[in-house]
Image (tube, rainbow, N blue to C red):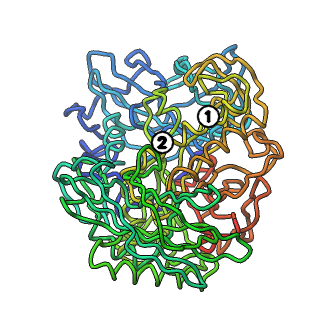
Amino acid sequence: MARSTVKPWTALWAITAVIAVVMLTAGPASAVPASPGSAVSPGSAVASPGAAQCQAGDLRISVPAAVRGDPAEGMGEQAWNLLFRDIASTACSLRGWPRLVVRTAAGKSVATTISDVRFSNLAPVPAARIILRPGRSAVVTAMSQTSPPGCVTGWTLGLTLPRAARPVTVREPAGSFVPCVGGQLRLSPFYAEQTLTHEIKALAVSAAPAPFPVSTAPEPPECSTAALRADVTSTVSQDVGSVIDLRLANTGGTCVLPGGWPTVRVQETGDVGQVAKILPDNAALQAEQSLLTTYEQRTAQRTALTLAPDGSVSIALLAVRTAGQQCRRLTSATIYPSAAGLGAGRRISVAAPVSICGPLRVLSFLPGSPGDVAARIARGALAEVRANPAEITHAGAHRFYYGTDSSAPDACGKGPYTEPVGACRAGTAGPYGEYIGEVGSFQYWESCTTSGLNWVQSNYDMANDNVVDYGTGLGAAAYWFAAGPGRDPHYNGTTSEAAIWGQKQAKRVISDISDDFFDFRYIFIDIENNGSPPDENGWNTVWNGPCGNKVKSEYVAANLDYATYLGFADYIDDHSPYLAGVYSAGGQSYGSWSGIFGSEPVGNAAEWTFTNQQSVLSFPSGFADSAVNAAWFGGAPAACDLMWQWSGGNGVLNGYGDFDQAAAANDENPSC
């Protein structure tokens, strides 16, 4: 076993604000000085600076299955915590790092390189002295890849406290999702459990204003289909394409349309149907800004369009004439009052002769009156799309944007927001181009864990502010941490059931994002596994249920995995205005795309890869630089190469978080 001490780069994450939206109004980041050379943890009460060093007999040392709300896993990384609870009748103190030896359940040593770092999965952690009063706990956070080489899921720890001579044995946590330990492991210093609680709560608190008007009043109920009236206000057919303007009016009491995008399904001759897909347009977003309201209740944010009695809103559909595409006549349109094209909607027959000669696009909500505003914006968007084959109307369409995902790091500034070079005080690397947050996971959905989601409200608001207020970047997008067919409670070895399992997860994620505004128009399915058997996420291993801990089979056929993936992606495409994307890895390893799906192709879904990451923050100008390059997967065309997690991913910790790069020209490239 090797051990090293790693110091963070200048300042960890975004010191100018706080990493992962750690708002220090809730309490200090880790410990506050009690006197020179000592510290008192928040809530520990004033204790004697001379409190003795904690001994093993003073503490109950454990690894909990989860700390409620703490993001435990996502994007190739895992984090778990050691708790040190003072069970003695007097206060004692801890400082620095414990020493660990990892063994299998049978007592065999597991090769592990342990690094002492000064950060946790959420924030910087100084090596300060922590004084514990009876009943209080300290924390050490352990971080690594989801499954580092040589790791094991059945283990014990030989843990030695600072200045102690003998180790104590700490057992793995109970439950179905035990971290795979071994290989590389990074440990934070001791810090107060109350600090971790503060940091978890701070994930939901935004340091940036929402881009839409804010109300603290209770959100009105969702509009019912019965209370809505829909009409076709105008249609325009030209050689370049068609524009269909719809109007949705409220005949009942005040209600809301959740989210920021209309959901419209059209029918064409030949019994062909499609759901109109999001087309970001700066002019439309500016017009929509005053229509949306962000309802805030404590830390919760919900964005919706509020319709007063007799109020109305316009919806513009664009059908660009695409060479080689068969044209069909539009016969009807159905508008849904939610983010999903499910259940009853308001159907409108279209009598005017309107041709659809390719994929249908929808602009963000537009003012219901005067009607010429919506028509003017729609015609301008059609002309812009026709002139730009990549269908991008964001500023800077032919560039790469830098962004972040999951729980760290924060963007910089007060608007327009910029990408940190590690920490904000170390400089920035251009506009903050995108944020991709975890909106759900199968473990959370199935109540398998009390861990939290990798979501930072501040970065979500900053990415949206940049798009709506400053006309830069791609905005915010969502990802779902998915389960393979081996976690399906109804697993029966058939592709039909595997597809249903994918559809159920997609339906849930559409529900989860119904109150959010996503201008970066993708829902990514996050596909990863332990990297070695057994695969706790169910892509290569069959378990006894979503939360079960018994292996039924160590093999899942690639076509079953693929049916789950297609079930998810097709459901997103068929029932929402969003587009499907996939996060996975290149190469031939157990946890890569090919290790799960074999030779099955990605298909026409946007790709987000995390292979070939590194910890160096040398920002690439494209999907390759002198040191590393993106490794794509599944044989998809280059037009589908959308994002690259180029630093910090897959447990390659850089002390700051995950850094991503997106190709704006491939943001829904029509050839993908």
Towards the viewer: 82 or 647: 647
Q: Earlier in the sequence, mark 1 or mark 2?
A: 2
Q: Secondary structure at mark 1?
A: helix
Horizontal side of 65 relative to 306 (left or right) equals: right
From the top left corner, tell me how far across and down residue 47 is, in percent: 22, 31
Towards the viewer: 548 or 16: 548
- Kindly identify the residue that appears in the image at 62 percent across and 48 percent down: 569
Residue type for callout 2: Gly
Residue type for callout 1: Ile
Q: Is residue 615 depicted above or below 83 in this figure?
A: below
Q: Is residue 554 depicted above or below 400 in this figure?
A: above
Please indicate, yes or no, whether residue 372 appears anywhere in the rendered image: yes
The residue wearing badge 2 is 440
Q: Quadrant of residue 136?
A: top left
- Kindly identify the residue that appears in the image at 50 percent across and 37 percent down: 72
Q: Quadrant of residue 66?
A: top left
Q: Secondary structure at mark 2?
A: strand
Total tally of numbered discs in the picture: 2
Horizontal side of 105 relative to 421 (left or right) equals: right
From the top left corner, tell me how far across and down residue 652 is, in percent: 63, 50
The residue wearing badge 1 is 500
Q: Nearer the viewer, mark 1 or mark 2?
A: 1
Neighbourhood count class around disc 1 (C-alpha, 10 Å): few under 14, some 14–19, many 20 upward? many
Towards the viewer: 65 or 31: 65
Which image quarter holds the C terminus? bottom right
From the top left corner, tell me how far across and down residue 166 is, in percent: 54, 19
Which image quarter holds the N terminus? top right
